[in-house]
Image (cartoon, rainbow, N blue to C red):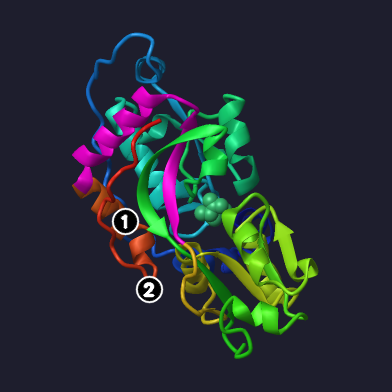
């Protein structure tokens, strides 16, 4: 089974295409259309005023993570992060069809904000101090936790400690991600860690038997488990906290406060967005909108 949509669409036969379109990420439940503000007014010179005036916003997100940011076979992105971005865009008076989606793998998230290639990043993006040196975060809007995914018939790996006890076991994660860093303290040797740019590549490697495990946030892994048709399972408890923030250019306090206000005003849409996306994945629980950090 391939977990990489682009490669999949390019190589599949017509029959397989039909099958894939019927299976997949529980997309029978469409997320509700977000509210789009009518001609909202903002103080001149603010990011909000500029974006509202432009009538479009560039959003960095993932294209390969079921439940959060996944490009479907029609070339549209879907998932909880996508819906969060639509709610924020709606507050700026920007309709979903006017959003420009930019595929943003983990390692380039700070870079695309610093280089003004996107206006915000909503991409399973953990808030932490290292990243805050280069960018700012609004949120958190959700808190995940790191876990381990293995093949369903693997009884040897039961949690991160298994990599300490078994120096031959390999684990895949993604360059520039917090899980890739945090797993290192459990490894007997650095060679046990295999890094790719995207988690779908790790899922493919696990499927092919090239690695023994994949590690990242529980909710990302659950998305792959649900698409795997019983091939994968999660093991052990979550062993970190990953508060997801919305990445914005460093120091844009007014934009951060606007994002907080917009999410607070749209709590119902937040819940509905979850239920139509990540909430469709078995093993996930509907979150409450968390308390936000102070904007800085
Ligand atoms: N939340 C973690 C991070 O921001 C892992 C997920 C990801 O790589 O997008 O690094």
Image-quadrant location for residue 115: top right
184 sits left or right of 86 in the view: right
Residue 16 quadrant = bottom right
Residue 173 location in percent, x, y? 65, 62
Magenta stretch holds residue 143: no
How crowded is the residue under tag 2: few (<14 C-alpha within 10 Å), some, or many (20+)? few
Residue, disc 1 = 274
Which residue lies at the image location 39% right of the left edge and 68% below the top edge?
A: 281
Q: Residue at x 25, y 56 (%)?
A: 288
Q: Percent x, y for residue 164?
A: 68, 79
Image: 143 above or below 206: above
* Earlier-in-chain disc, 2 versus 1: 1
Spot occupied by residue 210 in the image (x, y as percentages of width and height) = 75, 74
253 in magenta: yes
List the single residue furthest toward the right.
191
Whole-Å distance between the Cαs marked 2 and 1?
13 Å
Query: Foreground: 117 or 127?
Result: 127
């Amino acid at each position: 089974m391939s977990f990489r949509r682009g490669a999949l669409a390019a190589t599949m036969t017509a029959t397989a295409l039909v099958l894939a379109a019927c299976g997949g990420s529980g997309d029978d439940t469409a997320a509700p259309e977000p509210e789009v503000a009518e001609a909202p007014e903002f103080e001149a010179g603010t990011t909000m005023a500029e974006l509202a005036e432009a009538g479009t916003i560039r959003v960095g997100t993932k294209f390969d993570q079921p439940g959060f940011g996944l490009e479907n076979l029609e070339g549209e992105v879907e998932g909880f992060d996508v819906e969060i971005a639509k709610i924020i865009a709606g507050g700026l008076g920007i309709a979903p069809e006017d959003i420009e989606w930019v595929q943003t793998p983990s390692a380039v998230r700070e870079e695309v904000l610093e280089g003004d290639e996107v206006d915000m990043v909503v991409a399973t993006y953990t808030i932490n101090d290292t990243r805050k040196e280069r960018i700012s975060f609004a949120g958190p809007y959700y808190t995940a936790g790191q876990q381990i995914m293995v093949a369903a018939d693997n009884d040897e790996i039961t949690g991160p400690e298994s990599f300490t006890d078994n120096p031959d076991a390999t684990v895949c994660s993604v360059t520039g991600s917090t899980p890739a860093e945090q797993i290192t303290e459990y490894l007997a040797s650095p060679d046990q860690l295999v890094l790719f740019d995207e988690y779908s590549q790790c899922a493919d490697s696990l499927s092919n038997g090239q690695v023994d495990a994949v590690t990242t946030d529980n909710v990302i892994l659950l998305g792959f488990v649900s698409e795997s048709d019983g091939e994968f399972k999660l093991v052990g408890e979550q062993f970190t906290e990953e508060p997801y923030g919305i990445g914005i250019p460093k120091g844009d306090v007014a934009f951060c406060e606007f994002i907080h206000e917009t999410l607070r005003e749209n709590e119902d849409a937040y819940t509905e967005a979850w239920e139509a996306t990540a909430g469709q994945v078995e093993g996930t629980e509907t979150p409450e909108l968390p308390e936000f950090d102070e904007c800085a």
